[in-house]
Image (cartoon, rainbow, N blue to C red):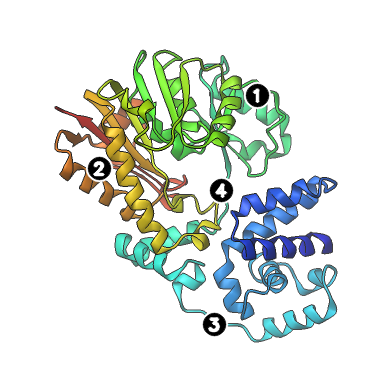
Amino acid sequence: MNRFAIKACADILGESLIKNLPADVQLSYYFKNNRNLGSSDRSDIAEIYYGVIRNKRLLEEIVGDAHCKKMILVYLLVLKGHSIKELSGVTDEYEIEWLVEKKKNKVHIDSWPTKLSLPDWIWAKLVLYYGEEEAIAFGTSLLSPATLQLRVNSLKTLSVQDVVNEFRLSFPDEVVKIKKTELSKQGITLPRGTAIQKHPLFLGGAIEVQEEGSQLLTLLLDVKRGHMVADFCAGAGGKTLALSALMKNTGRIYAFDISDRRLANMKQRLKRSGASNIAMQRISNENDLKIKRLRNKLDRVLVDAPCTGFGTLRRNPDLKWRQTEESLAELAIKQASILEAASKLCKKGGYLVYATCSILNDENENIIATFLENNQHFKIIPQHIIMAKSGVDIGEGDFLKLNPHTHKTDGFFGALMERIV
């Protein structure tokens, strides 16, 4: 940490708050325009930047407003444990005097949403769905940044343990933190910020960046060799590639998305992975003709629906400040429409999985309840029946529900339905 990093972070935060851009986009833009920065400066800036965004409401309460430099200093003093003496070397004298005064006159905070830096409306929903005790546990877990998690590509020859060993040799200072994931049999965990993009395992397609919960969701589809599958909102292809590996590179996976940019990213990943059973398809919307021609033909359909992303707040803390109750309501309408359209692709006996990286009932249970009411030719298959086939036990229940405070994964929801008529 140095004076430059603090000033740079204040500048980026200011821009981010004014433009309301995604936090990672704003940070990438800054780094792209400041290529001379060393890895240490980049690491310091990113850590402070995301730390302040993660704790923004609490810091505003202590500071009294959204003054970026002051929020950074309070973050370093109060939440990171730096001393006044340490901070006096990286900021101005008048700001140190202000900090000393703040330290003397501590702000007493009773409000849980303020302590946990959550908007009131999100806090109210968490308490409604989970009760206050679990809402506190969930909110607390979101204040800790997530580790880096990878999926070992079974289409390549290396085992999961081989990959763990390779990374331990490459990063000897992090040996203890490099390990297999607890729930996914194909996952490994590395310390956040580990530079893997130029590592031979990454370049050779032996690994893919994919969070453990996302890996587990693909198991819910219970894909088999030779299946015809659609990944309805494929994005950059993380789940698509995982499904390809589960299918041993057989059958056919249609990867649909409305974004050329996301599909271009998938193309690069596809090339590295060795997967040859994936057909990328750009569509205009969920009612595109490319989709309609597959009606009643597919064995498996995955709807990884666009959502608030509130299950990923450890990684994307800015989402809680950028989403609103109004945008949530709009998303729910879109989610229902996409699920309805995607369900038409399932043949009799086929499986349909609806998934989000959200923990709100509005985007999950409520969507499924309405869908089943209107589509009685589908029935729920309890998740534990399918997950047990892969040796995964997260307890019994109709839905796959993962949370950072209980499973140490991002928050995910998955519902498996079978077409019975």
Tell me the element at label 2: loop
- The answer for how far apart the CA atoms under marks 2 and 4 are is 26 Å
Residue under label 4 = 146
- The answer for how far apart the CA atoms under marks 1 and 3 are is 50 Å
Tell me the element at label 1: helix
Residue under label 2 = 397
Which amino acid, by three-letter code, is at mark 1?
Leu
Q: In the picture provided, is 320 more to the left or to the right than 377?
A: right
Residue under label 1 = 201
Q: Residue 366 carries which label?
A: none
Residue 68 spot, x, y in % from top left: 69, 70
Which amino acid, by three-letter code, is at mark 4?
Ala
Seen at 34% across and 52% down, the residue is: 332
Circle 1 residues within 10 Å: few <14, some 14–19, many ≥20? some
Residue 209 spot, x, y in % from top left: 57, 34
The answer, for residue 341, to whether it is visible in the render is yes
1 or 3: tag closer to the N-terminus: 3
Look at the image and tell me in which quarter the C terminus lies.
top left
Tell me the element at label 3: loop
The answer, for residue 184, to whether it is visible in the render is no
Seen at 31% across and 23% down, the residue is: 294
Residue under label 3 = 108
Which amino acid, by three-letter code, is at mark 2?
Gly
2 or 1: tag closer to the N-terminus: 1
2 or 4: tag closer to the N-terminus: 4
